[in-house]
Image (tube, rainbow, N blue to C red):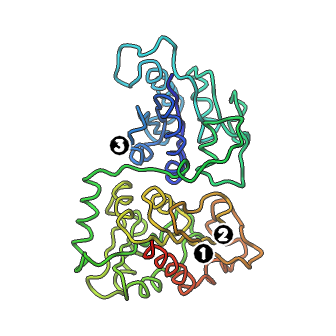
């Protein structure tokens, strides 16, 4: 029987759901209900049979969109694809739905679609609709928490291989990133360090990337990655470095092309945001800056030789599970007192380990 995974959350959460998808796919066909952005991230994933896109903010908003999505779930579960006209099973629908995104709306969708077995965390908003509730282990990485949904009732810890996320950029994704580098960097044979200075959450944006880039550029090229909101900081970083040794790829690449580019980097320096999860999937060593949040929340890097940077002596840390838009105390010491020298020191340690492997 086939399974349905529901994940309509942030980009990083979608990446961290891939170990769960991989585990379930070892047992049978797996479909994934996700957002348009999630469908882009999960494109080309060979462990996924169908992607069911739920655009709750646009095309599938309101009751009409809800009902339309319920219909898609029923059809895909019974027929095996969105287009098929012949049922692929004698049983109606999926054997189980795994609620990686625990909202009430997600739970109502799969319940309305007639999925009898519904598995999710005991802390989720939609838990009243679940038939099986899995303990949310705050002491484990979120990738492992999500993976555990496939094994309700078991407290057996997962191995690193089991919880390492996976992405599948195409050849075109690789070529696009290479083109950006060739356009802006003179010596492309020189290795590069990727920098990801952005975040949706303002207090997560470490302010010293320009200073760090100057230190890095003595020995490596620098490539800035991110979305459209990160173009300006990327331009600032590139403008202060010697011509031809840095590239600003922010806003120019899709998600999988960004992942492919990160996969070519010697290392990534990033905030506590989605690029560190892309790096985990691409096995790129990562130095992550943590300010208002801490890696103990379960969202640290998973690639070998990765490190985390943060001010451990501040009583006000952590102040938020995501990162508020403004520091609650007004001083933002968690980021202002984390110097470029601190982060560069950790990066140097990472690079020395990588070179010795």
Which element is circle 2 on?
loop
Q: CA distance from mark 1 to mark 3?
A: 33 Å
Residue situated in front as seen by the camera: 349 or 265? 349
Residue 241 numbered tag: none
| Among the two numbered marks 1 and 3 on one chain, the one whose residue lies closer to the N terminus | 3
Residue situated in front as seen by the camera: 303 or 31? 303
Which element is circle 3 on?
loop
Q: Is residue 162 above or below residue 74?
A: below
Q: Residue at x 58, y 30 (%)?
A: 97
Measured as percent of width and height from the top left, residue 248 is found at 33, 73
Residue 309 numbered tag: 1
Q: In the rendered view, does 167 fall on the left or right side of 331?
A: left
Q: Residue at x 63, y 60 (%)?
A: 322
Label 2: how many Cα within 10 Å (few below 14, some 14–19, many 20+) = many
Residue that label 2 marks:
292
Q: Is residue 102 above or below residue 349?
A: above
Q: Are marks 1 and 2 in contact (CB under 8 Å)?
A: no
Measured as percent of width and height from the top left, residue 168 is found at 37, 49
Residue that label 3 marks:
44
Q: How many marks?
A: 3
Which element is circle 1 on?
strand
Label 1: how many Cα within 10 Å (few below 14, some 14–19, many 20+) = many
Q: CA distance from mark 1 to mark 2?
A: 12 Å
Q: In the rendered view, does 88 fall on the left or right side of 175?
A: right
Q: Quadrant of the C terminus?
A: bottom left
Q: In the rendered view, does 84 fall on the left or right side of 124?
A: left
Residue situated in front as seen by the camera: 138 or 202? 138
Q: Is residue 317 above or below residue 258?
A: below
């Amino acid at each position: 029987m086939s399974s349905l995974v529901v994940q309509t959350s942030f980009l990083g959460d979608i990446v961290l759901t891939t170990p769960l998808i991989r585990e379930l796919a070892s047992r049978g066909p797996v479909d994934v209900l996700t957002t348009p952005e999630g469908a882009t991230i999960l494109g080309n994933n060979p462990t996924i049979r169908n992607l069911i896109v739920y655009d709750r903010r646009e095309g599938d908003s309101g009751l009409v969109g809800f009902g339309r999505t319920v219909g898609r779930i029923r059809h895909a579960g019974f027929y095996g694809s969105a287009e098929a006209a012949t049922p692929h099973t004698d049983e109606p629908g999926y054997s189980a739905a795994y609620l990686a995104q625990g909202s009430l709306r997600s739970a109502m969708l799969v319940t309305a679609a007639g999925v009898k077995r519904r598995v999710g965390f005991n802390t989720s908003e939609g838990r009243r609709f679940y038939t099986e509730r899995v303990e949310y282990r705050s002491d484990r990485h979120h990738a492992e928490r999500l993976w555990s949904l496939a094994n309700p009732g078991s407290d057996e810890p997962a191995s690193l291989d089991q919880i390492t996320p996976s992405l599948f950029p195409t050849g075109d994704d690789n070529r696009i990133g290479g083109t950006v580098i060739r356009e802006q960097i003179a010596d492309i044979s020189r290795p590069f360090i990727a920098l990801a200075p952005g975040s949706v959450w303002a207090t997560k944006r470490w302010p010293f990337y320009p200073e760090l880039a100057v230190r890095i550029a003595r020995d490596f090229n620098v490539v800035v990655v991110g979305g459209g909101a990160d173009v300006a900081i990327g331009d600032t970083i590139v403008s202060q470095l010697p011509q031809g040794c840095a590239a600003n790829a922010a806003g120019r690449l899709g998600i999988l092309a960004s992942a492919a580019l990160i996969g070519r980097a010697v290392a990534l320096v990033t905030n506590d945001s989605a690029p560190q999860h892309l790096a985990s999937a691409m096995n790129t060593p990562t130095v992550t800056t943590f300010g208002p949040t801490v890696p103990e929340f379960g969202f640290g890097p998973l690639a070998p030789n990765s490190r985390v940077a943060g001010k451990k002596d501040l009583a006000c840390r952590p102040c938020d599970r995501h990162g508020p838009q403004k520091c609650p105390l007004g001083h933002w010491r968690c980021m202002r007192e984390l110097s470029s020298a601190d982060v560069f020191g950790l990066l140097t340690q990472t690079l020395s380990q990588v070179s010795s492997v």
